[in-house]
Image: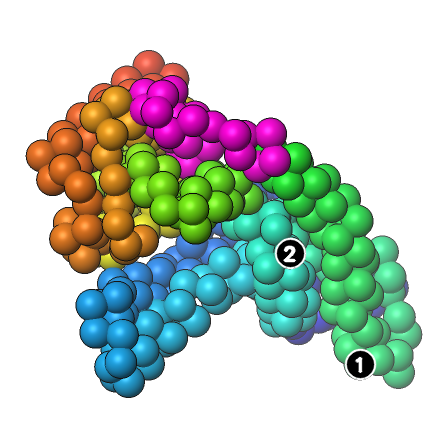
Amino acid sequence: MSTNRNDDLFEIEEGGVSSQSGLKTLFAHPFNHLRTGISYMLPFIMLGGILQAIGILTNVWPDSTILQTISLLGSTGMNFFVPFFGAFISYSIADKPGLAPGFVCSYLANSSGSGYLGALLAGFMVGYLIQVMNHYVRPSKMWEQIWGMFCPVIACVVVGLIVLGLLNGPITAFTDWAAARLSNLDSSQGALLGMVLGALDGVDYGGPISKIASAIAGAAYSEGITTFYGCRISMVMVPPLGIMLATFVAPKLFTKGEREYAKTGWLLTLIGGYTELALPIVLNDIVRCTIASFCGSVTASTIAGFFGQTLSVPALGLPSWFFVGNIPVYALSIVVGSLVTCAIVVLLKKYWKRKDFNPDAE
């Protein structure tokens, strides 16, 4: 961060604020910072998704050292895409001083239970807090370097306390409560089971709410009940596939960057099977995409539950086809769910247009 300061003027580059323009300028274009975070997290999703898809083959060859290493590399990449997402949101707002505290607080949010939404909020809070402090705190020349060192530290401590005290606590308590209440779901009521699991999985793309479904399915699997995972695997690919399909059906409703991502993202989704692969498009339009994702996920999971779909080995992407109990039902669930997601997101974007939409945006 570079500054140019006298008694009347304090300027900060890279999305900063001056006393002449006031704080209003700082908060004027949040989606620009969001897009920066998305662009920097994409390589981690692509790398981690491909490596983990290959690494899933350890379920077939568990003694393969190479596959174990590939799986470890993939999981590492997927674990770090969320912290880097938040870190580069903060960087976009506050330049280099926002990078380290943005990463630390986003990592804390993600690892402690609030997922990518917690990381998103942490990134914005860190970046804006640094800029606001720099706007109001104007040290003399001899203290500028000291302030430059401690300003990010203060931001990290403040946002870290907010993440732990206000975000993670209630979210973790809610997920534990919901998992306990839903743990008695009966696998014999397939359609209802699928509907509930699809609703949980379809709203936050691998975030804390979907962890409720994961906890329930994991507990059932440990008892030898595979229908829970069967319902979940049937909707995992639906949000990214449906939303990416919409970019081909109605390209004018999506930005250039979203369309370009979808050209390769759909193949990666089929290979890796991660719901998180929808995020680069979803984060530009969370409400509309999440409504569509929810509807498509519930549809796919309900179909799977109705037909009693099973998954004998928890595997994603291509390997999952070898472990599902009913391949035609698996294909039907994915196709119908994706079409529902695609249709709804196109309708929402067409008749409920998003503000500041720029089809040429990266």
Q: Left of 142 or right of it: where is 94?
A: left
Please identify the residue farthest to the top as the structure is shown.
Answer: 351
Dominant secondary structure (helix, strand or loop) of the stretch shown in magenta: helix
Say what amino acid the circle numbered 2 marks.
Answer: Ser
Q: Residues in magenta?
A: 179-202
Q: Percent position (x, y) of residue 210?
A: 47, 41
> Please, which colouring scheme is shown?
rainbow
Q: Is residue 119 above or below residue 225?
A: below
**Label ID, residue 122:** none
Q: Is residue 308 left or right of residue 131?
A: left
Say which residue appears at 70% left-offset and 40% top-offset: 173
Residue 349 visible in image: no
For marks 2 and 1 on the same chain, the one whose residue lies earlier in the sequence: 2
Crowdedness of circle 2 by 10 Å Cα count: few (<14), some, many (20+)? some
User: Mark 2, mark 1: which one is toward the viewer?
Assistant: 2
Instruction: Identify residue for label 1.
Output: 145
Residue occupying the point 11% across, 40% down: 327
SS at mark 1 in the image: helix
- Tell me the number on the disc at residue 112: 2
Q: Residue at x 31, y 78 (%)?
A: 68
Q: Is residue 181 magenta?
A: yes
Q: Are marks 2 and 1 in contact (CB under 8 Å)?
A: no
Q: Secondary structure at mark 2?
A: helix
Furthest-left residue in this view: 328
